[in-house]
Image: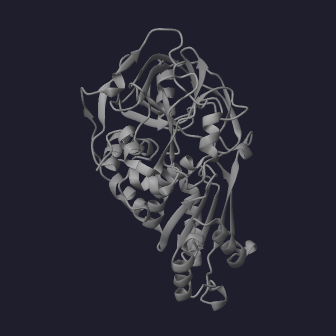
């Protein structure tokens, strides 16, 4: 059953949601709580935000695979398959008059953003940053909808800086700027997880509209309503919508900001002039901390699962794929079964070419748990010969937020073949006796992994 909105999803979490009654500051404190929460911690809802009466902040929403699976009404072990199957379909959005996001409308005043509890995340960040706003716009030439997540720095008053490093929004902005026109945008905040995931997927000719992908992922059309000051439609059940225009020909310093790489990054970025803020009563602001496990899960489902489908279509024996936590999608582990050494090498070259962010690919056999860094390190240590099994690719594109590529004209990538590549029993993994393992789990279950 699809969730109508973020509130519906939070209600469904039950005991997997912890409410925090103690007042917390949006400057550093909430980000610290979200970043340092245990990997198996519940989602968090902060009910009292210092300096922002009536507002709430929710975070850690998809930081664990069990909650991400709940968001898609799928079993955790079947989540990748459910995503790949649904993404091939599309359910177009529908227009509605029932628009909770319009319960409060603000268009007047010099500081439209000041009421929002936008988080300041790191000690050297230049200011508060919106990290999980779904930016909506239209291609000035074709009218096609664009949709993506882009970081935005609050500069005060009605101005925000926005990093536009990825298509399609970067291309739409360039086209509008070439005509000397502003690009109208709307930023939707506080959406149920399926819409957030859809905003960062790659679309194809079968389903070119990300909002239609969102409908397919959630199993029901997204309800949309006309914005107040821009010619766009926005999700009617979002918690908050910020409307505005990206100014043509304007660039201002944006940053430093602690990015998903875990390092600071600054840029000369375009500027948004905000024209309206609408929101629900007692609104919930979505907190997502860069370099956190929410980001890991989002990248795994939207980018990693996409790559899994592509690799399976072109290389035999591909079983599963994981994005290494904390690597901003730069490092990937692939499990294979019965894949020959030449095919493993082809897989590595293919993966490195398909995703410009990807810097390292490690391929292991499917007897290795790719979600256990200890097991992956074991395969690297015992099954790989560095001189034989390392593939280096030079002259590649440098991804904009990669600190190691700062100032470089070209980058490089690397792949590791850590498969056994032989039937020699010396490569067999030492295993515990199954009957003994079952017995000790029955007796000492709370101590067992």
Image height of 127 relative to 43, above or below:
above
Q: Quick check: 70 left or right of 387?
A: left
Disc tally is 0
Foreground residue among 449 and 189: 449
Q: Quick check: 233 left or right of 271?
A: left
Report the residue at 57% width, 18% height from top.
Answer: 249
Q: Kindly give the residue lying farthest to the bottom in the view shown.
A: 425
Q: At which x and y percent is residue 370?
A: 57, 67
Quadrant in the picture for residue 418: bottom right
Q: At which x and y percent is residue 64?
A: 51, 54
Report the residue at 41% width, 49% height from top.
Answer: 13
Q: Kindly give the residue lying farthest to the top in the view shown.
A: 109
Q: Quick check: 218 left or right of 334?
A: left
Report the residue at 52% width, 23% height from top.
Answer: 116
State the quadrant of the C terminus. bottom right
Q: Is residue 95 visible?
A: yes
Image height of 430 relative to 361, above or below:
below
Report the residue at 72% width, 33% height from top.
Answer: 123
Q: Is residue 270 visible?
A: no
Image height of 359 relative to 57, above or below:
below
């Amino acid at each position: 059953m699809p969730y109508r909105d973020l509130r519906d999803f939070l209600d469904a979490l039950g005991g997997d949601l912890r409410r925090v009654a103690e007042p917390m500051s949006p400057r550093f404190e909430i980000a610290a709580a979200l970043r340092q929460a245990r990997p198996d911690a519940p989602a968090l809802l902060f009910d009292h935000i210092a300096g922002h009466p009536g507002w709430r902040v929710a975070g850690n929403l998809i930081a664990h695979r069990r909650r991400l699976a709940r968001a898609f009404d799928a079993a955790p072990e079947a989540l990748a398959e459910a995503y790949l199957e649904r993404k091939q379909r599309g359910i177009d959005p529908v227009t509605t008059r029932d628009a909770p996001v319009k319960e409060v409308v603000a268009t007047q005043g010099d500081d439209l953003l000041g009421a929002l509890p936008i988080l300041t995340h790191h000690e050297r960040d230049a200011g508060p940053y919106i990290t999980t706003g779904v930016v909506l716009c239209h291609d000035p030439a074709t009218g096609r909808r664009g949709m993506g997540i882009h970081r935005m720095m609050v500069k005060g008053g009605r101005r925000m800086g926005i990093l536009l490093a990825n298509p399609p929004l970067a291309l739409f902005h360039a086209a509008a700027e070439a005509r000397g026109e502003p690009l109208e945008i709307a930023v939707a905040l506080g959406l149920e997880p399926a819409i957030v995931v859809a905003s960062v997927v790659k679309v194809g000719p079968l389903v070119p509209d990300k909002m239609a992908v969102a409908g397919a992922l959630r199993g029901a059309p997204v309800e949309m309503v006309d914005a107040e000051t821009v010619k766009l439609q926005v999700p009617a059940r979002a918690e908050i919508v910020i409307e505005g225009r990206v100014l043509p020909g304007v660039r201002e310093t944006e940053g430093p900001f602690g990015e998903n790489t875990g390092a600071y990054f600054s840029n000369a970025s375009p500027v948004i002039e905000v024209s309206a803020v609408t929101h629900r009563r007692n609104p919930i602001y979505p907190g997502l901390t860069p370099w956190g496990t929410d980001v890991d899960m989002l990248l795994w489902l939207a980018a990693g699962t996409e790559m899994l489908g592509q690799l399976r279509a072109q290389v035999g024996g591909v079983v599963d794929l994981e994005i290494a936590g904390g690597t901003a999608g730069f490092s990937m582990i692939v499990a294979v079964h019965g894949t020959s050494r030449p095919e493993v090498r082809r897989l590595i070259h293919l993966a490195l070419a398909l995703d410009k962010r990807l810097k390292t690919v490690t391929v292991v056999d499917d007897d290795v748990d790719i979600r256990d860094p200890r097991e992956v390190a074991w395969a690297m240590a015992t099954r790989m010969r560095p001189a034989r099994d390392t593939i280096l690719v030079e002259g590649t594109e440098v991804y904009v937020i990669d600190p190691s590529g700062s100032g470089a004209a070209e980058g490089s990538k690397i792949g590791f073949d850590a498969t056994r590549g032989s039937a020699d029993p010396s490569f067999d993994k030492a295993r515990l006796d199954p009957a003994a393992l079952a017995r000790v789990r029955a007796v000492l279950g709370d101590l067992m992994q």
